[in-house]
Amino acid sequence: MKIRFTPEEEAFRAECAAWLQAQLNGPFADIRGIVSQTFRAERRLEWERALGSARWSVIGWPEEFGGRNATLAQQVIFAEEYARSGAPGRVGHLGTELAGPTILHFGNDMQRERFLLPIARGEEFWCQGYSEPNAGSDLSNVRTRARLEQGPDGPEWVIEGQKIWTSLAQFADWCFVVCRTEQGSKGPAGISYLLVPMKQKGVTVKPIRQMTGDAEFNEVFFDGARTRAEYCVGKPGEGWKVAMGTLAFERGVSTLAQQMTFRNELEQVIAAARSNGAAADPLIRQRIAEAWTGLRIMRYSALRMLSRTTTGTMAPEAMTYKLHWATWRKKLGELAMDVVGAPGELCTGEGYELADLPYLYLFSRADTIYGGTNQIQRNIVAERALGLPKEPRGDR
Amino acid sequence: MHFALTEEQEAIREAARDFLSKRADSARLRKDMLLPEGHDPALWKEISGELGWAGISLPEDVGGSGLGMVETAILLEEQGRCLYGGPFLASAGLATALLLEAPASEARDAILARLAVGEATAALAVTGDSGRPGGDAVALELVEGPAGVQLRGHAAFVLNGNVADTFIAAAHDRRPGRDGLAMVAVAAGASGLAVKTLAAMDLTRPYARIECSNVQAVDLLVDGGGVAVARGLQVAQVALAAEQLGAMQAVMDLTTEYARQRVQFGRVIGSFQAIKHRLADMMVICEAARSAVYYAACVVDEYRSDPATGAAELAEAAALVKVYCSSGFHDVAGNAIQLHGGIGFTWEYDTQLFFKRARATSNLLGSPQYHREVIAELLGLDAATEAP
């Protein structure tokens, strides 16, 4: 057990930091420090391409697919330096963190050849077609369906249905769609994992405005949308396993970058407390210290998860991780508003513009919902990690 | 960077768990805690001597195994699981943490050599009757007497102090031209020293109170004014948290097992979400505590190999691991009683023992509230506020 980095790894850290600084003080100075996921999106797509061409986009991937074969320690270092530099959130993350690793792990050679390099280079962006109006927490209840038909260049899947809460679909070139390919099937059986192009006649994207005022996620309608028969990851009808594997990749190195963002947020709270005198309040001091404690432990837990060599499965400590961070961040939002006080309730500009901490306060209400609500997470922990009986279903 | 136990470390854990599950189970604990020592001296002799646990983190030149805090934490975690009441934590965890901060000396090394082979145990005396952490609560004084230094005053909440051969104590340095806390060692049999066992709410492990009236047989290990006592206490907090981790995991496991078997309304109670969700929250705490303990143990090892660069991280890690494990253990043990229902509240069931251990260890070396304030200061919340 060892938590320190070697001198070679520290040299790598310096290299990462130097490149990021040069970019964010130079050509990309205008997008430094952006919090919202959609703000200045066009520039951020350019940023993704800049990362790709310098091969900083997916450093853990094999070189042939645009990565650097980076070691775990190097990935940790890059994630930390990335967040420290104030670089904006990755609009390509659904490709680099979810679609890419899924195709790398569960896909075949043809799929790897076709899809990985464009993700790595920032040439193709992805979105995640999981939730539906009647399949939120109950994901295996998906109704979107696909059937095979003969197309002009061979067999094709024809997709009908609706997805919802699809983040960044408005920028996406591709969507990984969890849908039913066996008629009459129910639950996890009969589901397939299809890779579907977004820029086609049969796909309609409608933004949903969320309580922060942002419209980061969307409804996506598939109305006779098509994709090639071979763009099915895993065997047709056996996509549930792949879909669950994708979720395991969410607990990857990106969690460290996420934490650095949390750290920046907590430091903003501390700065606010010092400037308005809230730091003198003993209860606020206790809560800030508690938040710091939770933040540091998140880092330790993430390093622990990453030091395991499993792929595509979730260790018990990884199952508890979402509950830990989501609960933590919601509390941070509340702490932030208590520190800022009444001025936090005023908009800062035209329209519905909020300062960073009030924005965080509102956004953090989503943290305990998306990616599996806290209630679903507790079921997962209780059933899979603690071996307690599964919830009975009401419909089968 | 590889934050996972090595194969050797896993082997230490397995061996410890195997031994303790056979020799220190609940029935044995219930029997041993009624002995005058508060534990079985024969079992302690075996653990400290034959198994060599007492010297695990001591340098090889004093007869120890030369291993680190991670290995010590493993042994502490395993002992926490069975609420072991012998003086391993007190001696090899807490007192040793302070001793290793003192510069090598004949007196220090002689004590360490006896501890390493289990010939003697030490106990930590760093607070007075208030039980609070920090210099203000220390009620021992080191003064200049007619024939050298003398120790006077008292210390309370001395864990396993009833069986200690040596007390490692913090004392206000009142000699002319000195101030701050000195670190001293005093033998249990020293003339002028009285030891009294205290009856405590936590049944699994006794405290003692010591009274010193001008004790002259004192080994001065560190003069007042330095950082040795403070740093040693930080390391001690990590050791204590490791033991808390094992205990909270054990009471969590006990409760999960109960929820799998207890049937009400025609189904096991572990199938109700009200129970499942609370158990899930308990597991979140246990896993986070495990991350915190082993990270902090690594920080101790880094600090010991390079004190100058490691000190800042040690101060932080030691405070937060004590905060998290103390409040976490208390939460988990409290929930364990609730989920067991009526039998969880009985004398007969072990949940009460875990709950009381949680309470006792929460105060020991500083409460979560105290250490959150330490963290607030580390975060610079006291620095001059900027103009709005």
Image: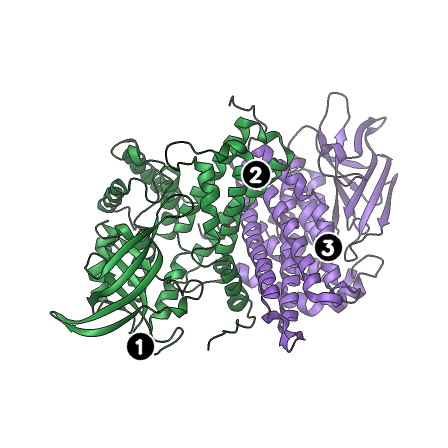
Rendered location of residue A22, percent (x, y): 28, 33
Q: How many other residues sit within 10 Å of disc 1, few (<14), some (14-19) or many (≥20)?
A: some
- Which image quadrant for residue B43? bottom right
Q: Which residue is mark 2?
A: A288
Q: Amino acid at mark 2?
A: Ile
Q: Which residue is mark 3?
A: B357
Chain that appears green: A
| Closer-to-camera residue (B42/B114) | B42
Residue at disc 2, secondary structure = helix
Gap in angstroms between the C-alphas marked 1 and 3: 56 Å
Q: Amino acid at mark 3?
A: Arg
Residue lying at 78% horizontally and 46% vertically, measured from the top left: B158
Q: How many other residues sit within 10 Å of disc 2, few (<14), some (14-19) or many (≥20)?
A: many
Q: Which residue is mark 1?
A: A182
Q: Are marks 1 and 2 in contact (CB under 8 Å)?
A: no
Q: Amino acid at mark 1?
A: Glu
> Given the image, what chain letter belongs to the residue carrying mark 1?
A
Residue lying at 73% horizontally and 55% vertically, measured from the top left: B357
| Closer-to-camera residue (A108/B166) | A108
